[in-house]
Image (tube, grey):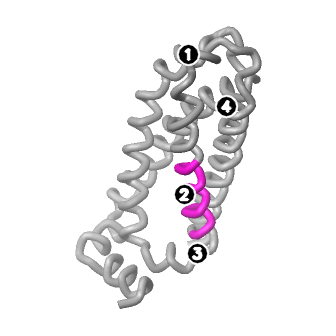
Amino acid sequence: MSLLEICQWLQDTQFGTSLRESIWMFPIVEGTHVMALSLSVGTLLWMDLRLTGTFMKTQPMSKVSSSVLPWTLAGFAIMTITGLLLFWCQAVKAYNSIFFKMKVAMLFLAALNAIAYHSTIYLRMDEWDKAIPPPRRARWAGWCSIVLWIGIIICGRTMAYNF
């Protein structure tokens, strides 16, 4: 079974068809996805701007992180669930969309960036917590995150208007 056939099957399930054709549920799921994106990426942007050394310079990174990370993770969880639901009901369109493929690639790179940051420089935050500017690797992780999330959002919105 090819990936396209799996996408076709997924989209044609009773749940996928019901969600896609629902007058109320599809817009609710899509709206929730956008709101969760705003929460997740909005709070992530605060952390990334602190990492780059361009915002909240006098605030310790540990304080910024502990304040917004729970909101970022909650938004990300909701965004992931609603994103999977949106994919489920339009899997073939997503499969055929270059913007979806670019979005997934950038999501993968954003995840790698987050893993690299949290498994290296974050573990030594006590050494640089109040540094102005933060270490080069922290700034690099922040800028990479910002650029990737801008690309992810652009691809997601472009994908929505090309279905």
Mark sitting earlier along the chain (4/3): 3
Compute the Cα span from label 2 to label 3.
17 Å
What type is the residue that disc 1 sits on? Asp
Element type at mark 4: helix
Q: Earlier in the sequence, mark 2 or mark 3?
A: 3
Decide: few, some or many residues near mark 3? Use Cα within 10 Å; few <14, some 14-19, many ≥20. some
Residue 107 pos. (x, y %): 55, 55
Crowding around mark 1 (Cα neighbors within 10 Å: few <14, some 14 to 19, many 20+) is few
Q: Earlier in the sequence, mark 2 or mark 4?
A: 2
Whether residue 133 sits left or right of residue 124 in the image: it is: right
- The amino acid type, in three-letter code, at marker 2 is Phe
Residue located at (45% from left, 49% from top): 33
Q: What residue does disc 2 label?
A: 108
- Label 1: element kind: helix
Give me the disc on residue 126: 1
Per the rendering, the mark at residue 97 is: 3
- The residue lying at 44 percent from left, 54 percent from top is 30
